[in-house]
Image: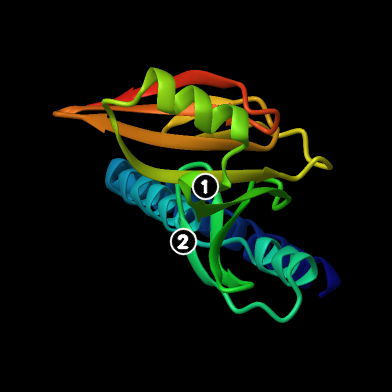
Amino acid sequence: MKNVMAATAALFLLVNVNAADITANRFKKESASHSPITNHLKKELRKQFREEKRNEINDLSKLHFEQDFSNAKAVWNKSPNYDEAVFMQDGNEVTAYYDGTTELVGTTMVKSFNDLPLAAKEYLEKHYSDYTKDEVIFFDDNELNETNMNLYDTPFEDEDNYFVELSKGDKKIILRVNMEGQVSFFKNIH
C-alpha cells in the first residue's frame, strides 16, 4: 500500500511540475508576443516620469531656501539649470538660484545705473553715451558654492557682478561690471 501511495504521489507531483512548466512556457510566449508594445509603453512612461521630475522643484531646494532666507515667502520657478525662488527682501524683488545639488549659487536683483561703482558709471558715460541704459542686474555670489552661474544663457565665473543692458536701435548688448568698476563685454542679445 505504501508503494502505491508513493507511486501515486510521485505521479501527481510529476503531472503538477509538467503543468507548471507548460503554463510558464505559454506565459513566456504570450509575453514575448506582446513585449514590443509593453516595452515601448514602459519606455514612454519612464520618459514621461523623468520629464515630470525634471520640471519639479526639489524639496531640498525649498528647505535650503528656508534656511538661507528665514521668514521669506517665495514663488518657485524651474529653469533648465536651477530651482529659482523669487521673493521680496528689503523692498526689492530677489531671485535665489539653487543648483542640481540644491545649494544656493547666488541671488540677483534689479538695481539702477546709480548703484554701479563710480568708475563704471564714468566709463559707460564716456564709451556708451549713445546707448540707452536699460536694466542693471546685480548678481550676489554665494562664495560657499563653487558652481558657476549662468545668466542670459551664458555661464560665468562665480563672483559678485553687475550686468548692464544697453541698447542702440535694434542692437542690444550686456556689459559686465565687477565690484571695482571694471567694465567688460559680456554678450550680444539679438
Picture quarter containing residue 131? top left
- Say what amino acid the circle numbered 1 marks: Asn
N-terminal-most mark, 2 or 1: 2
- Say what amino acid the circle numbered 2 marks: Asn
Q: For numbered disc 2, what is the local secondary structure?
A: strand
Here the colouring is rainbow
Instruction: Give the vertical position of 72 relative to 52 (above or below).
Output: below
Q: For numbered disc 1, what is the local secondary structure?
A: helix
x and y, in percent, of residue 47 in the image: 40, 47
Contact, mark 2 vs mark 1 (Cβ under 8 Å)? no
**Residue drawn at x 46%, y 44% as measured from the top left:** 136
Left or right: residue 82 versus residue 27 is right
Left or right: residue 154 versus residue 160 is left
Q: Nearer the viewer, mark 2 or mark 1?
A: 1
x and y, in percent, of residue 42 in the image: 39, 50
| Crowd band around label 2 with a 10 angstrom C-alpha radius: few (<14), some (14–19), many (20+) | some
Instruction: Give the vertical position of 143 relative to 155 (above or below).
Output: below
Picture quarter containing residue 148? top right
For the C terminus, give its image quadrant. Answer: top left
For the N terminus, give its image quadrant. Answer: bottom right
**Residue drawn at x 26%, y 25% as measured from the top left:** 130
Q: Which mark is residue 114?
A: 1
Q: Nearer the viewer, residue 39 or 132?
A: 132
Residue at the disc numbered 2: 77
**Residue drawn at x 58%, y 26% as measured from the top left:** 156
Q: CA distance from mark 2 to mark 1?
A: 30 Å
Q: Nearer the viewer, residue 30 or 48?
A: 48
Give the total number of marks visible in the rendering. Answer: 2
